[in-house]
Amino acid sequence: MKKILVFTMAASLVACKAPKPKSIEEANPVEYANTITPEELKEHLFTFASDEFEGRETGEPGQKKAAEYLKSEYKKLNIPSPLGEDDYFQEVPSSVFTRGNIKDTENVLAYIKGTALPEEILVISSHYDHVGIDDEGNIYNGADDDGSGTVAILEIAEAFKKAKEDGFGPKRSILFLNVTGEEKGLVGSKYYTDNPVFPLEQTVTNLNIDMIGRVGEGKEKAGDYVYLIGSDKLSTELHELSEAVNQKYLNLELDYTYNDENDPNRFYYRSDHYNFAKNDIPIIFYFNGVHEDYHKPTDTPDKIEYDLLAKRAKLVFLTAWEVANRDQRPVVDKPTMAETVAE
């Protein structure tokens, strides 16, 4: 009887000393945003956009090296794959490519499970492929396109992981989706939305990053800015959330020039977010605009504006934090793709 009493008292003392469960509202997201640094982005990108990766041509050895690099970085961060065990690759077969002789390739997926609404998914995406090597042997390193978005996702993933380790895991699950085949017609993201790991009806938002490391043409005197495209196309709420997050934390200039339906560049239709938008999932596309090195061998990591890249990556992280942790998913209140087609 005495032994049982002693054990019970000891258990009670341990229970009293156990830390109280943490509420996400107690967290300071800026603390985790500040783990996204120019130095770490630079270190990643000087590797990822180096000649060793041979321009990351879809299906070619350089792209395979890039996929392995992403996998190894997620594993270092102890961020698992939603595919289970050691499998971080969603295979994308050559048969889905409609142009060119493209070999089998893969999307790279990592995942942080939500604490309160794990069945709801926020997707943060970028494409990690580029255009390879030309006939004269010039390597197209693609530091901005889209090495910048890819390394930003690694830093964003690390920030969310550190928050989780401190007891502030996101309410909703987050899928870090590095897609292949963007340069071949948004093929990797289409393959994912055609073969989703998580149901699309449970995918609440897609934040897509494609080129955020440079200053675009005509913005040389703009200061800290980023182009936003698509934030209001399906959800007024997502657009207002995005604006509020920026105003509260960063005050970047949010430029909506390319969001105009009449913009001749039609960027809304030209990156991987569009395959989510086609499925009536609210999206935001983050973009710095084109520049003199766009799709040239001169798009190299020494030309990246790393301080600006870090600020833009922080904006994506803080927006993702808000989407992941608010009580309700962003409401779709604009005409959906199905409704638009019906008209």
Image: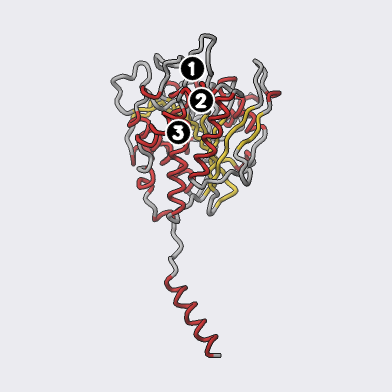
Q: CA distance from mark 2 to mark 3?
A: 14 Å
The amino acid marked with disc number 3 is Val
Reply above or below: 300 against 118. Answer: above
- The picture places residue 295, in percent across and down from the top left corner, at 47, 16
Q: CA distance from mark 1 to mark 2?
A: 9 Å
Q: Earlier in the sequence, mark 2 or mark 3?
A: 2
The quarter in which the C terminus is drawn is top right
Residue drawn at the location 34% of the way across and 16% of the way down = 218
Q: CA distance from mark 3 to mark 1?
A: 19 Å
Reply above or below: 2 against 212. Answer: below
Q: Nearer the viewer, residue 333 or 273?
A: 273
Q: Which residue is mark 2?
A: 53
Residue 243 seen in this snapshot: no
The amino acid marked with disc number 2 is Phe
The amino acid marked with disc number 1 is Ile
Residue 41 seen in this snapshot: yes
Q: Which residue is mark 1?
A: 139
Q: Nearer the viewer, residue 292 or 3?
A: 3
